[in-house]
Amino acid sequence: MIGTIDVRDLVGRPGASKVEQLSGTVEDLETELASLARDAPIRGELVLESIVEGIFASGRLEGAFELRCARCLREFEQGFAVELHEFFVPFPHEDSDEYPLEPEGFLEPDQMVRDVVGVELPFAPVCRPDCRGLCARCGGDLNLGECTCEEPRIDPRWEGLDVLLEELRHDGDDQTDQADDQAETQEG
């Protein structure tokens, strides 16, 4: 949890502002391949400005994601930094992007942090741009070298088609040779 921020000194005083440091964790913010690093809290600095409608929060949050490569499934960590510009108002409209400002003069930044950081979670993270992924046959990591698994055996029921394909290739080569011979004869 990030924790409640006391803004009683700002409420009803348009133009007043203060800076607050944030540090904490957000629970259950993850996808199949990405989550927030469990041992590294989200940190940041918020500038809170009093406006007629409520409080305007702006700043930058930093942290780290624990990721699993979508190609090779290797786990790795990657830092992130995100800018935010959000409004906290006493009575947010249901269809708005505003966050609630408690009547006592407190604001809860947890949902805002969850929303801002959540959209940064990568959908298909890749450990490196040239990641080759896994072998489709044996599942070996192709980043470690060429796969040594054997080519799959052809189902014996398809052997007749394999013979036919080879014959067609041979006949096609013969026809190409004949066409080349005819072209040379006509040129000469």
Image (tube, helix red, strand yellow):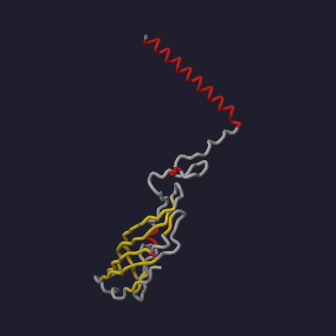
Report the front residue among 79 and 29. 79
Q: Position of residue 183 (x, y in %)?
A: 47, 15
| Vertical placement of residue 153 versus 71, above or below | above
Decide if residue 51 is in sight here: no
Residue 20 horizontal side relative to residue 125, left or right: left
Q: From the viewer's side, name the closer residue of 91 and 154.
A: 154
Compared to residue 21, the image places residue 121 above or below, namely above
- In x, y percent, where is residue 97? 42, 73
x, y (%) of residue 184? 46, 14
Name the quarter where the C terminus is drawn: top left
> In the depicted view, which residue is nearer to us: 14 or 118?
118
Residue 13: tell me if it is visible. Answer: yes
- Please name the residue shown 30% across and 86% down the image: 13
Please provide percent x and percent y for residue 22. Answer: 40, 78
- Residue 167 lies in what quarter of the image? top right
> How many dots with numbers?
0
Q: Nearer the viewer, residue 184 or 59?
A: 184
Residue pictured at 48% horizontal, 73% vertical: 39
Instruction: Locate residue 70 relative to residue 167 in the image: left or right.
Output: left
Query: Which residue shows up at 61% across the image and 50% down it?
Result: 138
Horizontal side of 70 relative to 85 (left or right) equals right
Q: Residue furthest top?
A: 188
